[in-house]
């Protein structure tokens, strides 16, 4: 079931402290054109410090969803994301004066109120959708999420929370068929919670110095401290709220059934990536375009690299001149492991960067492949190496066009091993005929 995209009709503003940083921040929400998605701007860092709310922007953080683009980052985005996903608002500009969104009372209620007061309007573009057609499961120990085929016009969610015998948070299960009304009535007011035993650890990490029992639901031996539950199963509901927020990062409506047990943000992000990969392999319409998979022969038809220097095995997502996602499977049979290093095989970091550059080349050249051009690398900027890559790893390569002209282009690239960022870099290219490449 398709629908029109939506944005807000008027600008809206809110101010408050961040839960983790404790900093006071001013947030301004503004209407955005169709197909924009949610784009944050760190006004304190300048107008170019923008962060798109996509799964590719997720940065690993402790118990929250943080989005980053180069040096610009936005902390604790999940409650605003959930509000947009729950109300069905797709396009928005969000300007903030600091690194973290206001926490309010620890729920999404303030954002829901703000957005509804601003008014919600339809736009002249269809909202893409992703229908779960095959079971997908992600798991980390006792935490697990399974996405299953279900109604073609609805998303149903179930969350099972059980911290085991003796926990101060009792076992609970919550089910919901998603709709704007159901989200507002059943999820929006549920608050972030934490165990009293975890508070000191939070403070030792440097977080939550300004948090109070009013802004954080703290469970002690006898239940919430200095507070009362809004729902008997409020913790399970808030976990579901977080899941709704993280699903928004797919930038499409998701239809099917999702069952989660003990999961948090990290596993939610893995689920979104897996769902998008499934959609790519099946040619499902996502974000208004076909996610086209490219096999190795199609890749070699676009870029000139060959064995032993072709470092992209497959392209699993592709939006022409916008972004691409590729895979490099790292085998012990790679020729470079013979000397780097005997007994401790590690993929040279420069080859990880080369793999990212090759995917960027595919992204830039596919539309001009018949012109015989080559993407010649002319500069690297903001290179960061986060993790070593070893035999048996699978590199997930991501490339997103920052700017593109007739002869030059700049691409932001990342490489992941699972949920761990291995490398990132901004790469500038010049598009030249093969005989002109130096």
Image: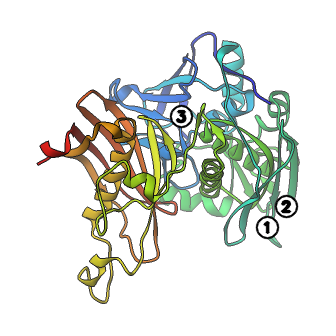
Tell me the CA gap for discs 1 and 2. 6 Å
Q: Which residue is mark 2?
A: 170
Query: Would you say the residues marked 1 and 2 are in contact, meaning their CB atoms lie under 8 Å apart?
Result: yes
Q: Position of residue 284 (x, y in %)?
A: 66, 42
Q: Which residue is mark 3?
A: 101
- Residue furthest out toward the top: 10
- SS at mark 1 in the image: loop
> Looking at the image, is mark 3 or mark 2 nearer the viewer?
3
Q: Quadrant of the N terminus?
A: top right
User: Which residue is at the front of the view, 43 or 105?
Assistant: 43
Give the mark count: 3
Of the numbered discs 3 and 2, the one sitting upstream in the chain is 3
Could one spot residue 209 in this view of the protein?
no
Vertical position of residue 291 compared to residue 310: above or below = above
Tell me the CA gap for discs 1 and 3. 31 Å
For image coordinates 49% across by 56% down, the residue present is 295
- SS at mark 2 in the image: loop
* Side (left or right) of 179 relative to 424: right
For image coordinates 32% across by 72% down, the residue present is 347
Q: Which residue is mark 1?
A: 167
């Amino acid at each position: 079931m398709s629908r029109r995209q939506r944005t807000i009709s008027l600008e809206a503003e809110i101010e408050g402290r961040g839960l983790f940083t404790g900093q006071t921040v001013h947030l301004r929400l503004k209407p955005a054109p169709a197909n924009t998605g949610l784009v944050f701007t760190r006004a304190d860092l300048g107008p170019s410090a923008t962060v798109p709310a996509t799964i590719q922007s997720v940065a690993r953080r402790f118990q929250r969803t943080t989005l980053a683009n180069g040096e610009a980052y936005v902390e604790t985005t999940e409650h605003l994301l959930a509000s947009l996903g729950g109300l069905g608002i797709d396009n928005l500009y969000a300007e903030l004066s600091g690194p973290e969104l206001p926490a309010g009372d620890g729920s999404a209620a303030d954002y829901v109120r703000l957005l509804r007061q601003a008014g919600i309007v339809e736009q002249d573009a269809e909202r893409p959708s992703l229908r779960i057609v095959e079971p997908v499961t992600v798991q980390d120990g006792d935490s697990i999420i399974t996405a299953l085929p279900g109604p073609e016009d609805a998303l149903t969610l179930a969350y099972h929370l059980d911290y085991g015998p003796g926990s101060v948070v009792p076992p609970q299960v919550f089910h919901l068929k998603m709709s704007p009304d159901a989200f507002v009535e059943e999820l929006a007011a549920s608050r972030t919670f934490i165990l009293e035993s975890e508070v000191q650890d939070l403070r030792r990490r440097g977080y939550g110095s300004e948090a109070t029992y009013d802004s954080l639901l703290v469970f002690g031996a006898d239940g919430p401290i200095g507070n009362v539950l809004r729902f008997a199963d409020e913790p399970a509901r808030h976990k579901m709220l977080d899941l709704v927020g993280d699903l928004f990062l797919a930038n499409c409506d998701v239809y099917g059934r999702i069952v989660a047990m003990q999961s948090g943000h990290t596993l939610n992000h893995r689920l979104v990536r897996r769902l998008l990969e499934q959609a790519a392999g099946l040619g499902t319409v996502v974000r208004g375009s076909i996610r086209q998979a490219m096999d190795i022969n199609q890749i070699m038809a676009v870029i000139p690299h060959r064995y032993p220097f072709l470092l992209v095995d497959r392209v699993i997502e592709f939006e022409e001149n916008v972004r691409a996602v590729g895979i490099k499977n790292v085998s012990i049979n790679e020729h470079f492991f013979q000397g780097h290093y005997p007994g401790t095989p590690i993929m040279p970091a420069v080859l990880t960067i080369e793999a990212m550059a090759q995917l960027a080349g595919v992204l830039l050249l596919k539309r001009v492949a018949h012109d015989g051009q080559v993407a010649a690398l002319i500069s690297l900027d903001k290179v960061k190496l986060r993790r070593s890559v070893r035999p048996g790893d699978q590199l997930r390569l991501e490339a997103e066009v920052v700017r593109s002209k007739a002869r030059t282009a700049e691409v932001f690239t990342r490489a992941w091993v699972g949920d761990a960022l291995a490398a990132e870099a901004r790469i500038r290219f010049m598009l030249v005929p093969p005989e002109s490449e130096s």
